[in-house]
Image: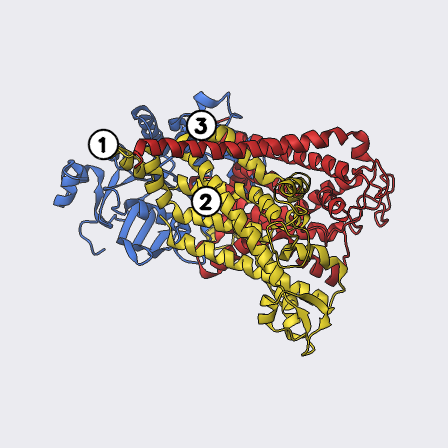
């Protein structure tokens, strides 16, 4: 029979070991990706275009596409999520309809991204004739992004003390004015943190994009100012393979000669982007904390 | 009025700023305040006293329709202000609250600068003239006895002020709206004795221009500052009279027990 | 004299108008989200049921048969569509991933909340957050270049199969389960622990008999949430599972999941064709499973509130 103290020691040992393994997994993941990928990342890789059959292909277009899609989809999702975040935090209260809204948001956030992608394919690409395009991709990413952003906006607004709302109301301001001019500024750091984390998430998203933004990255001409031309970088209707989709594609189709190098390099870039998004969110989060606790 | 323990003012001798008739408050099914009828004389301070849960804050918050924002709360009866029943649906609550201002239990300055705390709502309500705004900031801060301490730091965050200073800023912010009536919900309960004394002094200064209704736990405070006092117990206004009468010769034993500190 | 204040009280102020407008704006944008969800469910359900309604495939056969040949007709003139291999593949990788991840997640959560909150905060917390943020294609790529060769060396075969899939998913869902378990453990009131320790129980006795027991509903929610993620994950799994529409015969035989089949084939089929309809029915299963996972977590949360 084990004595309770011995058991305690053994259990503690197991917990330390398992926790340690997690840290080791992440550390080796990071080291592996950065170690095997960074050596391929140079200016040329970041800017030159990918040519599927030859060596030395770069990911310049994909990188641009990833950022451009991110920006467009944030432009669409921010107003929607901020408005619905305001509704849920300030006006909703408790009722059957509000319950339906909350369940909808929960369902949306747990849908597999491939299902969201297929929905985007069906609705945006086919029914609305947008084709494989930046716009289809951005709208699909918006669907994917909305529940998370909305919830983060709602939580940030709810974290602002109710006494701030009472202050606004007692001065004859409407709830809406109080929210827009008092509550949102106070909640802004939290809202931005949520946005940055959401941005990080969609930056690496691929499953929702392979059938919406497409799997091809036609070369871009940055000197082309005709917005309807397929080589104009800002053209919303052109197909746009992103970095994440590119990694998937070169690995599953194997048409690229240096697939491993391209994937390793692109993975390294994605990971660095995620790290930056993460640090940025943390930095802003800390600022909130200081603002709420420490006056200036 | 039916209740003989509730003083009825002679409107020929006293100017009435506000009046309630059978105001009743429910939270859901629960009656939080029984029918209360009371008059508030202009340019006087009226104290509402009583223990926690006696209904005094609930009553105060009905006067500028702040209870509208409490989910499940409903206020019945009439609240007469300028000859209008402001408890009706067709009354604009935002306009109402401009004229019936409020200061809360805990100081709640906006996380903006001192200057903006006072001017923000004014600007939203359409006041644009910089000189006018500057002047209001100065006079209200002076009235709230805060000017001397902050005049050089108007652009500093209001959150950097001490609790007592924050509360006086909130008073300045409320009177910047030039309200008729100022409701104060235990404005000094979260403050130290010195800040409390400052707030009381401020109230006495304000009396010349404002009708003040204050909820307080502190009986000395009620007796020091107010002209009229209402005693609430268990969701009911038990007795209302001139302050000195309430504190020296209350008509009801319960009131006497409360003001002499036997319970509550 | 005219009482302007009295007059203003009976007119609709600018603030009142702004309030109405704001309410309408915020409600309409919220409605957009609800409409989106309803249309996703509607579209996928409509497309996914075509194979049964139009092509006459028996739903029971669809779920149990193991042959996927949408372009071949059976004796009754219906296309041969058996989704069992993908369904089994999805469930197997999901269950394996959850079984491996759970002890790790609980250990890490116990370490973070019960043993060392300081080190937990400094090291494990950021590690977990970073793991959440790593894109799934990166997991897939590492699965392909590290896990698959490793499995090949150890277990034989090509290395592609449910074992590799489960291992990749394990790492992917670990942070989700861990952080939700941490929340569940943190929600256990401190006095539970103090009472137990005061009775002379060791830390492990307190943790296992009091804290983990009290947090069980929360931990279950975390595990189901993780499984829901694993079940719906597409690209990382697709890259390492081998993509053969065959019933998995061993942990290292190439097989497939619902998501991997969808990822690989949706682009190669013509909209409206039988094979395309068949694919949409797989998407419908994914959607239904996601709804089921969602309902279960909600039911647990409702029953297990503190």
CA separation in Å, label 2 and label 3: 42 Å
Residue C142 at x, y percent in the picture? 66, 39
Secondary structure type for disc 3 = helix
Q: What is the chain letter for disc 3?
A: C
* Chain (blue): B
The quarter of the picture where the N terminus of chain B appears is bottom left
The quarter of the picture where the C terminus of chain B appears is top left
Q: What is the chain letter for disc 1?
A: B
* Chain (red): A
Residue B33 at x, y percent in the picture? 27, 52
A209 to the left or right of A23: right
Question: Which residue position holds label 2?
Answer: A169
Q: Nearer the viewer, residue B18 or B253?
A: B253
Image vertical order of residue B109 relative to residue C35, above or below: above
Nearest to viewer (mark 2 / mark 3): 3
Question: Which residue position holds label 3?
Answer: C118
Q: How is the model colour-coded?
A: by chain
Crowding at label 2, few (<14), some or many (≥20) Cα neighbours within 10 Å?
many
- The circle on residue C97 is none
Which residue shows up at 58% across the image and 34% down it?
Answer: A26
Secondary structure type for disc 2 = helix
Question: Which residue position holds label 1?
Answer: B220
Colour chosen for chain C: yellow
Crowding at label 3, few (<14), some or many (≥20) Cα neighbours within 10 Å?
few
Crowding at label 1, few (<14), some or many (≥20) Cα neighbours within 10 Å?
few
CA separation in Å, label 1 and label 2: 31 Å
Q: Nearer the viewer, residue A276 or C113?
A: C113
């Amino acid at each position: 029979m084990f004595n309770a103290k011995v058991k305690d020691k053994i259990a503690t040992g197991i917990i330390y070991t398992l926790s340690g393994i997690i840290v080791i997994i992440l550390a080796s993941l990071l080291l592996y990706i950065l170690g095997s990928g960074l050596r391929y990342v140079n200016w040329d890789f970041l800017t030159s275009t990918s040519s599927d059959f030859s060596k030395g292909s770069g990911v310049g277009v994909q990188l641009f596409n990833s950022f451009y899609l991110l920006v467009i989809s944030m432009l669409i999702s921010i107003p929607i999520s901020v408005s619905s975040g305001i509704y849920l935090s300030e006006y909703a209260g408790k009722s059957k309809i509000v319950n339906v809204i909350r369940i909808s948001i929960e369902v949306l956030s747990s849908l597999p991204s491939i299902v969201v992608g297929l929905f985007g394919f069906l609705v945006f690409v086919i029914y609305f004739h947008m084709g494989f395009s930046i716009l289809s991709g951005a709208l699909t990413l918006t669907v994917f992004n909305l529940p998370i952003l909305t919830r983060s906006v709602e939580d940030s607004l709810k974290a602002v003390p109710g006494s701030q709302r009472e202050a606004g109301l007692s001065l004859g301001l409407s709830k809406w004015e109080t929210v827009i001019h008092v509550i949102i500024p106070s909640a802004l750091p939290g809202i931005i943190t949520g946005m940055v984390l959401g941005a990080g998430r969609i930056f690496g998203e691929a499953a929702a994009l392979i059938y919406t933004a497409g799997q091809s990255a036609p070369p871009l001409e940055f000197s082309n100012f005709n917005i309807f031309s397929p080589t104009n970088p800002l053209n919303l209707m052109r197909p746009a393979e992103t970095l994440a989709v590119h990694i998937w594609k070169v690995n599953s189709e194997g048409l690229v000669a240096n697939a491993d190098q391209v994937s390793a390099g692109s993975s390294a870039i994605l990971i660095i982007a995620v790290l930056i998004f993460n640090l940025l969110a943390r930095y802003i989060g800390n600022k909130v904390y200081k603002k709420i606790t420490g006056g200036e | 009025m039916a209740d003989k323990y509730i003083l009825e003012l002679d409107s020929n001798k006293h100017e009435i700023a506000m009046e309630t008739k059978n105001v009743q408050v429910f939270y859901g099914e629960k009656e939080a305040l029984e029918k209360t009828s009371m008059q508030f004389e202009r340019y006087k301070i009226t104290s509402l006293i009583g223990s926690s849960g006696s209904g005094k804050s609930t009553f105060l918050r009905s006067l500028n329709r702040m209870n509208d924002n409490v989910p499940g709360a409903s206020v019945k009866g009439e609240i007469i202000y300028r000859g209008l029943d402001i408890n009706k649906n067709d009354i604009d609550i935002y306009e109402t609250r401009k004229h019936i201002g409020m200061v809360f239990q805990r100081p709640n300055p906006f996380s903006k600068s001192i200057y903006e705390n006072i001017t923000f709502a004014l600007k939203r309500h359409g006041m644009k003239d910089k000189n006018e705004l500057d002047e209001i900031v100065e006079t209200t801060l002076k009235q709230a006895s805060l000017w001397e301490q902050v005049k050089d730091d108007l652009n500093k965050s209001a959150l950097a002020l001490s609790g007592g200073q924050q509360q006086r800023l909130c008073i300045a912010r409320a009177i910047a709206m030039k309200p008729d009536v100022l409701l104060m919900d235990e404005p000094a309960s979260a403050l130290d004795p010195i800040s409390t004394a400052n707030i009381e002094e401020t109230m006495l200064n304000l009396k010349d221009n404002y009708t003040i209704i204050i909820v307080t736990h502190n009986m000395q405070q009620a007796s020091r500052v107010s002209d009229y006092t209402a005693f609430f117990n268990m969701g009911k206004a038990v007795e209302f009279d001139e302050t000195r009468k309430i504190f020296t010769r209350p008509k009801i034993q319960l009131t006497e027990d409360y003001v002499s500190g036997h319970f509550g | 004299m005219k009482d302007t204040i009295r007059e203003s009280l009976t007119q609709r102020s600018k603030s009142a108008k702004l309030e109405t407008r704001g309410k309408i704006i915020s409600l309409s944008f919220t409605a957009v989200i609800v409409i989106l969800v309803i249309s996703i469910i509607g579209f996928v359900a409509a497309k996914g049921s075509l194979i049964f309604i139009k092509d006459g495939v028996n739903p029971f056969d669809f779920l149990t048969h193991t042959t996927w040949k949408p372009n071949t007709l059976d004796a009754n003139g219906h296309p041969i569509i058996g989704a069992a291999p993908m369904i089994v593949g999805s469930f197997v990788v999901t269950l394996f991933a959850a079984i491996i991840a759970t002890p790790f997640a609980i250990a890490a959560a116990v370490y973070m909340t019960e043993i060392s909150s300081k080190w937990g905060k400094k090291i494990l917390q950021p590690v977990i957050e970073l793991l959440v943020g790593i894109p799934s294609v990166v997991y897939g790529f590492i699965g392909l270049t590290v896990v698959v060769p490793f499995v090949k060396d150890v277990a034989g075969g090509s290395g592609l199969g449910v074992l590799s899939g489960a291992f990749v998913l394990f790492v992917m869902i670990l942070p989700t389960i861990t952080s939700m378990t941490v929340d569940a453990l943190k929600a256990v009131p401190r006095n539970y622990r103090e009472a137990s320790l005061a009775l002379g129980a060791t830390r492990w006795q307190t943790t296992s008999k009091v804290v983990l027991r009290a947090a069980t509903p929360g931990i279950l929610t975390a595990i189901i949430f993780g499984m829901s993620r694993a079940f719906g994950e597409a690209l990382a799994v697709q890259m390492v599972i081998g993509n053969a529409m065959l019933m998995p015969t061993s942990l290292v035989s190439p097989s497939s999941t619902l998501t991997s089949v969808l990822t690989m084939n949706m682009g190669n089929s013509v909209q409206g064709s039988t094979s395309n309809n068949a694919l949409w029915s797989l998407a419908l299963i994914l959607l239904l499973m996601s709804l089921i996972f969602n309902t279960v977590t909600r039911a647990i949360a409702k029953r297990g509130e503190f």
